Amino acid sequence: MARKHHKPEEIVAKLRQVEVLLAQGKSAVEAVRVIGVTEQTYYRWRSEYGGLKLDQVRRPKVLEQENGRLRRAVADLTLEKLALKEAALGNW
């Protein structure tokens, strides 16, 4: 059986759904069964995403993209600097 990869937004929504079901008096096993994952997956998600809001889940992804852009910019500038240094020394 193929594994379904849930997006972080979906995980947060499912964790909230479990919280609601637990508040209604259902057991953890029943609540986890309703969202369609195993207990182990639920507890792993809860430890990783528990207490986060949607904007907090999206933030790391945005930061990773910005970090990648900045790394490429630094690499480009470093190459330009080395080329200019070589040209200044007259090794071309």
Image (cartoon, rainbow, N blue to C red):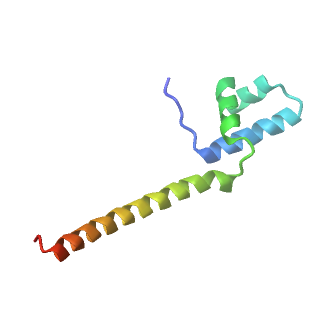
The vertical placement of 80 against 40, above or below, is: below
Q: Position of residue 27 (x, y in %)?
A: 83, 25
Nearer to the camera, 14 or 79: 79
The quarter of the displayed image where residue 58 is located: bottom right
Q: Quadrant of the C terminus?
A: bottom left
Q: Position of residue 32 (x, y in %)?
A: 73, 28
Q: Which residue occupies 67% across, 54% down? A: 56
Q: In screen coordinates, is 34 left or right of 21?
A: left
Nearer to the camera, 68 or 92: 92
Q: Which residue occupies 70% across, 39% down? A: 14
The vertical placement of 9 against 88, above or below, is: above
Q: In screen coordinates, is 58 left or right of 21?
A: left
Nearer to the camera, 24 or 54: 54
Is residue 38 something that shows in the picture?
A: no
Q: Which residue occupies 89% across, 30% down? A: 25
Report the number of discs. 0
The quarter of the displayed image where residue 37 is located: top right
